[in-house]
Amino acid sequence: MIDPAAAPDAEYASYPSLAGRAVLITGGADGVGAGLVTEFAKQGSRVAFLDLQETKAAEVVAACEAEDVAYTPIFRKVDLVDIGAMQATIAELSQEVGGFDVLVNNAANDDRHGWEDMTVDYWDDRLNTNLRHFFFALQSVAPAMIERGRGSIVNVGSSSYMMQEDFFPGYAIAKSGVEGITRTMARTFGPHGVRVNTVLPGWVATERQLEKWWSPEGEEGTLRDQAIKRRIYPREFAQMVLFLAADDGAACTAQQFLVDGGRR
């Protein structure tokens, strides 16, 4: 895992409204997701997270326990492409925690690929991996939120489609659809007190990004394009999500928020 201490020293906010609230995070075993699990746990939230990576998930849980959090995060292994299995797992977790107050749709895979190599099967895989489960996770948790008259759904998008990056068209196109889910469902759920927002990361220095895609030339270009001339870290990205999940973000819905260091 990326060491959260790698982020610049900062005194981050504490949100009393998040203490004890049930939070579901998809893709929480590494990268941005691991940062989200850790930061919500440190707020005193009751966190459950879904992923396929058991070893990395155990590391995240251990890291949270080392922080002496009030509630140890709950991990469930599930393939989010299997919607039936995902929804059954969410239903079981909902029974355990009494319904979720917050959903963070985070899980995605940004493998590089060329447009000329795209097949129908790979197209379906990109949308199923990066978009489809967002809606069906939302469908699973929204009834409990509507019943209690409050809730926050945060969809993690990507700035890639806005920047017209062309080295993973299936991923970027799927991520553009996240904004459609956010704006449509924010209108649907707003009268019930449930908010839906998108947070878009730029280039966040996760273990995966540094191991698979980092190059000196790539980082030089990123920092050139950013207004803030340094790396952005998962812990920093999580702070925007915390704000939107907490009561402090109660007036924010149907919006997209960029956490990208001012990249153009």
Image (spheres, grey):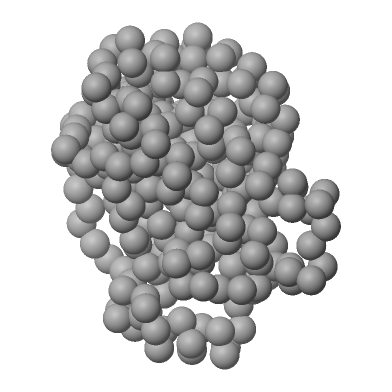
Q: Is residue 112 visible?
A: yes
Q: Position of residue 241 (x, y in %)?
A: 33, 46
On screen, residue 11 versus residue 207, left or right, reads left
**Left or right, residue 106 beside residue 23:** right
Nearest the eye: 17 or 169: 169
Callout count: 0
Task: Tell which of 234 and 157 is nearer to you.
Answer: 157
Q: Residue at x 21, y 29 (%)?
A: 17
Residue 69 in view here: no
The picture places residue 214, in percent across and down from the top left corner, at 60, 77
The spot of residue 228 in percent (x, y) is 30, 79
Q: Quadrant of residue 80?
A: top right
> Which residue corresponds to the image point at 51% horizontal and 66% vertical from the top-left?
160
Q: Quadrant of residue 78?
A: top right
Establish if 123 lies above or below 230.
above
Compared with 189, 175 (above or below) is: below
For the C terminus, the image quarter is: bottom left
Question: Which quadrant, please, contains the N terminus?
Answer: bottom right
Q: Position of residue 176 (x, y in %)?
A: 50, 55
**Location of residue 116 (image quadrant):** bottom right
The answer to whether residue 15 is left or right of residue 36 is left
Q: Is residue 109 above or below residue 133?
A: below
* Drawn side of residue 11 relative to residue 136, left or right: left
Residue that appears at 74% across and 46% down:
124
Q: Residue at x 72, y 30 (%)?
A: 82
